[in-house]
Image: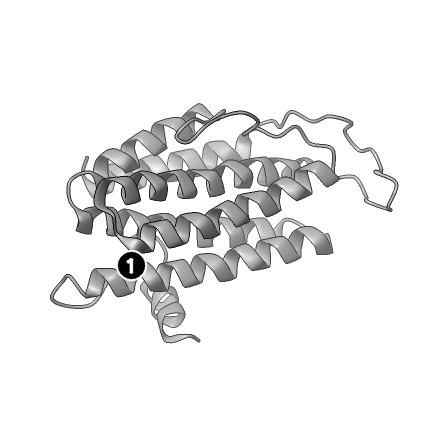
Amino acid sequence: MDRNALLALIVGCVVTGWMLQPVVAGRGKDDGDGTASLTEQEEADLLFMREEEKLARDVYIAFHALWGTPVFENISRSEQRHTDSVLALLDRYGLIDPVDEHGVGEFENQELQELYDELVADGEVSELAALFVGALIEEVDIEDILIAMESTEKRDIHNVYANLLAGSENHLVAFVGNIEQRIDGDYEAQYIAQDAVDAILSGN
């Protein structure tokens, strides 16, 4: 699968994720600690983010099994914490978890299922290709998190997203470091603006 087709699939999945109507248990209920109702956009973002973070984890688990590169194992553990932190918000707001009993590489969202399959196939080509897939995932995550942060004024949700953003930026730095050890030249942004990537890599 060429990179342009891969990017088009990712964009399509992201847009589809935003448009999904979430399955909600106890819509608008107060959980007794002053939690306010979620907007439909907040619900959709949380449900999508839960599976998107799982997707990153699952892809990295697959790549570590395939290539044994330490960065994949390390970041997959971090992604587990990310998806768990989103789950805590789902529980707090009474949303049904889309992950539920799904195992590694299994998704409720069929668009994400197809995306997972495509990303893993792309990373099976070589270790370097897998590292580029990892960097691409983190760029997409950064964009998605920033957009989701703009759609909520709830402090607890915003704080979780801020932590996810910091993590994704660190992950991108780690992947780029591994990539640049294996290529002649500098890493070029695959999804977000090059200036944004350069700022992240420089720590600004």
Extreme left residue here? Answer: 184
Q: Would residue 154 appear left or right of 139 to someone viewing this image?
A: right
From the image, tell me which residue sits under label 1: 189
Q: Position of residue 63 (x, y in %)?
A: 28, 42
Q: How many marks?
A: 1
Residue 74 visible in the displayed image: yes
What residue do we see at 35% from left, 33% from top? 116
Residue 139 visible in the displayed image: no
What residue do we see at 40% from left, 68% from top? 200
Amino acid type at circle 1 is Ala
Report the quarter where the N terminus lies: top left
Q: Quadrant of residue 202?
A: bottom left
Which sits in the foreground, 37 or 104? 104
What residue do we see at 40% from left, 53% from top? 75
Which sits in the foreground, 135 or 54? 54
Q: Residues within 10 Å of mark 1 (few under 14, many from 20)?
A: some
Q: Would residue 156 appear left or right of 52 to someone viewing this image?
A: right
**Is 61 placed above or below 107 here?**
below
What residue do we see at 60% from left, 26% from top? 21
Q: Secondary structure at mark 1?
A: loop
Q: Quadrant of residue 90?
A: top right
Q: Position of residue 125 (x, y in %)?
A: 15, 40
Which sits in the foreground, 67 or 93? 67
Q: Position of residue 149 (x, y in %)?
A: 60, 53
Report the quarter where the C terminus lies: bottom left
Coloring scheme of the render? Answer: one colour
